Each structure stands twice: as structure tokens, then as C-alpha cells.
Amino acid sequence: MLDIRAEPRDPGMKGDMLATAGSHGDPQVRIGPEVIEEWKRSPMCPAHGEVTFVGDYEEGVQVLRSRAFRTNRFTAEGTNPVWVVVGEDRSVRFAATDGRGDPTEPAVDWATVLAGADTLSSLQGEEHKRRRRALSPIFGRGSHRWYHDTAIGPTIGRSLQGALDSADEDGVVHVDLVPFTHRLFVQLTAGLVGLDGVEDDERADALADLFERMHEAAPMTVPADALTEAAMTDALAARDEFKQRFVDPSQAAREELVARSRRGEIGEEELPRDYLTLVAKGADTFDSAETVLNQAFPLFSGSTGTSTLVVLHMLQDLFAWHEEHPEIGAIPTDPDFLEHALAETIRLQNPGLPFITRFAVEDSDLAGGRHVDAGEVVNLYLPAVNEDPAAFGEDAHRFDPTRETPAGIPAYGLGFGGGVHMCPATPLVLGEGGISGTIVPTVAALLRAGAEPDPDRPPVRRPEIEKLDPTIESFPVLLHRR
């Protein structure tokens, strides 16, 4: 069993990693102190107190399922809000604070300004249950079929054909999969949220640009000491434009559709099955326009950047695996094989942040015997948890699309989290009930178009810490028009 734990160095430090396991290909790679130092700068890091790092799969499941650990940083003791003042002109400045970091003037936490404190990931208890129940129809099998037929298939086909139409005389297309796949998932996610007109590439790029500006000051990804007043002001302007340009007109259109349905002018089956239609029909917990916008933000951001990374990592994994197994001929494109490959990629690559952070609200004992006090932070380090040989075998660090996992252990490990805060969109990503999700059809279409690494231009990853930031900046491939 893996043993990753914190060792406090002084009251102001949050602990250091003593041991790790696994790093996708090398089970001996150690997490350097720079990774922990980077995490300490993140908004999820507490201002004081102890941190326990978990790298054991059994303990990871325990933490995610136990009510003794919460996800909501807004109610956790010891976290430092970034206090700001929003002017009448929507400019943002840091609030004046005292020596303890408390505001000395009327102020709000920047996290609540940009992202709200009333989203599915931040709500707790009964409020969380109500919101998850309210959103469940867009992730159910009926909506999944509608989404597959009206958005996934047509969008992938249109995007790929547009690329193939630019082939040279030899039928070869040079494509950087980073912008190609990101635009594709912007358009796919717009269908899930219910944003109109995003099938137009220019409009899709404009939408992507707004989210990029918001992410430049996103409180869950940008360290507090890296935030600037200019970036926050621009992020808030982008959020306002997202609402006015995309959300408001699309919501008005759906309210009219729902009204027509209630008047009997169109059938219920003719209504879209997206998020904004759900809201227009009177879904529980969406009592204000601000709440509607707050929930749209994580729905969109979580389904674009993360899905893009999953596709890129999955193709990179498959290309490397194929080099080791040339005897199979072409990489299989059947759904069963690709679904297994997808699970392996999610388990190993952790395309989101590698830590899942929880706050202990009561004293607990972990499965391995360690004690966690109330108020302590527990960090699940996914590259270790998902490579635990006790759960996934002695070669758990290797990509193997033919891997079989023991009963009760999902092939993707804890890549989607777990417990009541497990990602609700998991069925849309993985597929369910014989209906493919968003990733497998995308990868299959690219492989059928002859996708292969560009021999002259290797992928480029950010030069920083790959395990903390898995972003791929460029992924050139060749496609072949047949």
C-alpha cells in the first residue's frame, strides 16, 4: 500500500511529501518539493493547519465517500478569501485588509464574484442533493441519446470534414489537435448548456476567448498571489459578456419554446434537452438569473478544457502503445476497445488538477491507520492513488487498454472523483447503456481519418510541472483524406 503523508516543518508550512509512487511509466518518480510548493500557492491550500496527503486507493475512496470530509472551501476554517471591491463601473480592486487578512471595508470574496458559491460542486447537504436532482435530467439516458444524435455526431462530422477539405494534393492534412479539439468541445458543450449559434466557428472562437479570459483569474486555478486587479476586472467583463451575448438570448429562446409547448403548439418531445431548457421548464433551485449563470460556468468550463486534454492524452497514449504493439496493425476503433483505452487514460493522466482536496469536519481514522483531526486538509494525489498496485496490479503505472480491474474498482480509478460529489457528467464522457460519450466518437473519427503523429513536429507540453499542470500546448498530427 502506498504511504504518502505530510510532515510539518514549522507552524507556517503545510507539509512536505515524503514518498510517492507511480508517474505514468516510471513507478519510482518522486514528486519534487516544487510540486508541493506550487500546491501551497493554490486557492485550496489552507492558511494554517495540517495537511495529510493520500496516495492509497482504499483511503482515497474512504475520504471521498465519508461525510467527515467536505468539498466546500467557503465553509472550511483556515482558508483565505481574496477580498475585493467591485465598483459601479464593474472594475475590481483588492479590498483593504488588516493584519489578519480580514477586510476593513465592505468587500466580497473574489471566488463568489466570478464563480458564485451556489454551484453543484460547492453546495453541501440537502442543497447539494436538490441541485444534483435538478440537473439529473440533462445527464440521464434520454438526454444522452438526444445529445448524441443532435450534437455529438453532427459536430464531430462537421469539424472533421472541415479539416479534411484543406488536404494537400497528396490528401494529407496537417492539423494541430489543440485548437481543433478545443473548438470541437466548445461547440459540443454549447449544445449541452443550450447556447445557440455556436456551430459557427467564429462564434465558437469568441466564446472560447471569453472563457480563456475568465480562467486567467479563476479563483480555483490561479494562486491568490498571482491575481491582479487588471486580470480580475477583465475576467468579470468577460463573464458579463458571456451572459449578455450567449446566455441571455439563448435562455429567452428556450423560455419561448417552453411557452409554446405549454400552449400545445409544439410537443414536449420537440424541446431541446439542454441545461437552459431545463431551467426554462422551472427546475428546482434555480431561483435567480445569477444562479443560472453561476451553474452554467462550471458546466461549460469543465466540459471543454478537460475533455480536450482527455482526447489529446488518449491519442498520445494510444500512439505510444501502438509503437510497442505493431503486431495489432492499425489501432482498433471499435467502441469497446476505445472505452477501455479511455478509462486507462483518465486513470493515468489525471487531465484535471492532480489533487482532490477535502476538508475534515470531524476527527477520522483512515483505512491505513493514520488519524486526521477536524480542520485538517486531506489531499488525494491522483497520480499515486490511481497507480496503486494494490488496486490496479503491479504494472499499474503502465497504459494497458486490455487491463482488467477487480470487481468494484472502476477502470478509471478516481478520475471522476467519488461519493456525492462525483462528476455528474461521467455518463456523457464515458458513455452509458450502449450510447457512446463525447470522447470515444471523437477519437474514433480521428483514427479513421488516419490520424498519426506528425514526424516533423512533436507535441509540446508546458515546461512547468507536468503532473500539476497536464496542459498540452501543441499536438500536431497528420490526417489523410481517403
Image (tube, rainbow, N blue to C red):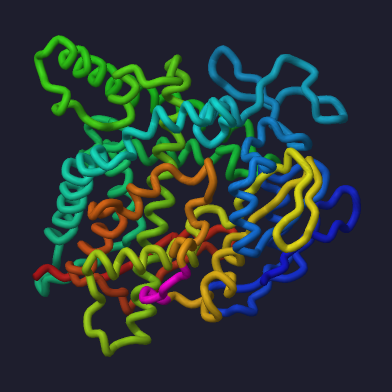
Q: Main secondary structure of the magenta part?
A: loop
Between 481 and 130, the one nearer to me in the picture: 130
Q: Is residue 193 left or right of residue 97?
A: left
Image quadrant assignment for residue 371: bottom right
Q: Is residue 67 left or right of residue 386?
A: right
Image quadrant assignment for residue 292: top left
Residue 420 visible from this viewpoint: yes
The image shows residue 61 at horizontal and vertical percentages of: 59, 55
Image quadrant assignment for residue 430: bottom left
* In the image, residue 396 above or below residue 309: below
- The number of discs equals 0
* Start-end of magenta stretch: 400-406
Residue 457 visible from this viewpoint: no
For the N terminus, the quadrant is bottom right
* In the image, residue 370 above or below residue 393: above
Residue in view at x 65 percent, y 63 percent: 55
The image shows residue 391 at horizontal and vertical percentages of: 55, 70
Between 75 and 35, the one nearer to me in the picture: 75
Q: Residue furthest front?
A: 407
Q: Residue furthest right?
A: 10
Q: Residue furthest top?
A: 263
The image shows residue 92 at horizontal and vertical percentages of: 61, 24
For the C terminus, the quadrant is bottom left
Residue in view at x 53 percent, y 41 percent: 420
Residue in view at x 22 percent, y 47 percent: 152
Q: Is residue 330 left or right of residue 126?
A: left
The image shows residue 441 at horizontal and vertical percentages of: 24, 58
- Is residue 439 in the magenta section? no
